[in-house]
């Protein structure tokens, strides 16, 4: 199951970063690793747009099939972080999750 | 009259018939002939010729969607593309029923401009995120939702008939 979460997805299943309705930044992520990296690089406006719509939770739960990660993101959403704080907290959750999954795959 | 480069010549009578049809496509050949001072058989022959050559593409109804009760939203997408993939992106967009019009434009970058209809903002976003952004060659997208319409008209043959003396023949395939 963990290897499934860390797999690379086909482009139609990737996460596409927008800054508002219909405004695509040109950035996308097709794996948990790429998603983790992009969260650290992407415009905060895009992060806030997706975060408060619940897009990150939806994609991690339904496409990556990582319910645990989706729940962690949901918990963070209840704390209503904004701006750089949101970026840092989200990145921290993703790094921790990705590292844990990677370590289980190595054994 | 036909030319080597697959065009046919339209004379002033053809243009007057086209203008009459654009005003009201439900007029009879007799009514058009009467208003233009010519026989209905002349009107018939010329209309059939222009249909055969694809100059008259179709006869359709223009519906006021607001009055018809539709609550859809209309948006204009500007899609920045990789020039090598641009035609493929445009062709793919043409397949989607949500897309009403597709154009390419070359300004500083190669752009595709498309008019899109959706039930609401959420379905508009869903369509763009799942069907447009993933297309190979799409670099980024800017979308503007139309909030108020001040004018909408179709290009009329009467607007500039001199420019339309030669119209490219459409194949009858």
Image: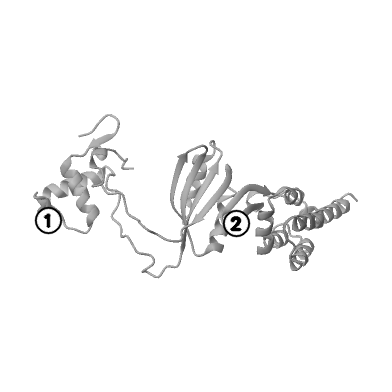
Q: Chain of mark 1?
A: B
- Between residues B86 and A79, which one lies in front from this camera angle? A79
B70 or A5, nearer to the observer: B70
Q: Residues within 10 Å of mark 2 (few under 14, many from 20)?
A: some
Q: Nearer the viewer, mark 2 or mark 1?
A: 2
Say whether residue B119 is left or right of residue B26: right
Most extreme residue toward the right is: A107
Q: Using the rendered view, name the quadrant where residue A72 is placed.
A: bottom right
Residue B108 against residue B30 in the figure, above or below: above
Q: Is residue B3 above or below residue B92?
A: above
Residue A23 higher or lower than B87, as above or below:
below
Q: Quadrant of the N terminus of chain A?
A: bottom right
* Residue at numbered disc 2: A20
Please tell me whether mark 2 sits on a helix, a strand or a loop: strand
**Measuring 25% from the left and 44% from the top, which residue is drawn there?**
B52
Circles 2 and 1, Cβ within 8 Å, touching? The answer is: no
The residue that appears at 46% across and 64% down in the rendered structure is: B72
Q: Position of residue B69 (x, y in %)?
A: 40, 70
Report how far apart the C-alphas of labels 2 and 1 lie in the structure: 55 Å
Residue B54 coordinates in the image, percent (x, y): 29, 44
Picture coordinates of residue A91, whole percent (x, y): 78, 54
Q: Which residue is mark 1?
A: B30
């Amino acid at each position: 199951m963990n290897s499934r979460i860390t797999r690379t997805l086909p482009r139609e299943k990737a996460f596409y970063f927008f800054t508002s309705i219909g405004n695509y930044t040109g950035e996308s992520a097709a794996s948990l690793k790429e998603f983790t990296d992009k969260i650290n690089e992407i415009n905060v406006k895009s992060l806030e747009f997706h975060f408060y719509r619940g897009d990150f939770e939806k994609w991690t739960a339904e496409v990556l099939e990582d319910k645990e990660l989706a729940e962690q993101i949901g918990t963070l959403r209840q704390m209503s972080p904004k701006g750089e704080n949101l970026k840092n907290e989200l990145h921290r959750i993703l790094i921790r999750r990705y590292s844990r999954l990677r370590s289980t795959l190595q054994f | 009259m036909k030319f080597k480069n697959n065009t046919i010549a339209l004379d002033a009578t053809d243009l007057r018939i086209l203008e009459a049809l654009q005003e009201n496509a439900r007029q009879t050949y007799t009514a058009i002939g009467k208003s233009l001072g010519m026989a209905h058989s002349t009107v018939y022959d010329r209309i059939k010729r222009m249909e055969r050559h694809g100059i008259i593409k179709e006869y359709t109804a223009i519906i006021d969607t607001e009055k018809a009760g539709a609550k859809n939203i209309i948006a204009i997408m500007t899609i920045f593309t990789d020039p090598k993939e641009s035609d493929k992106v445009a062709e793919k967009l043409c397949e989607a029923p949500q897309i009403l019009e597709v154009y390419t434009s070359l300004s500083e970058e190669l752009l595709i401009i498309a008019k899109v209809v959706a039930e609401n903002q959420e379905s508009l976003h869903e369509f763009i995120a799942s069907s447009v952004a993933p297309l190979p060659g799409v670099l980024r997208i800017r979308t503007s939702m139309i909030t108020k319409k001040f004018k909408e008209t179709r290009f009329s043959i009467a607007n500039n008939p001199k420019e339309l003396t030669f119209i490219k023949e459409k194949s009858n395939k």
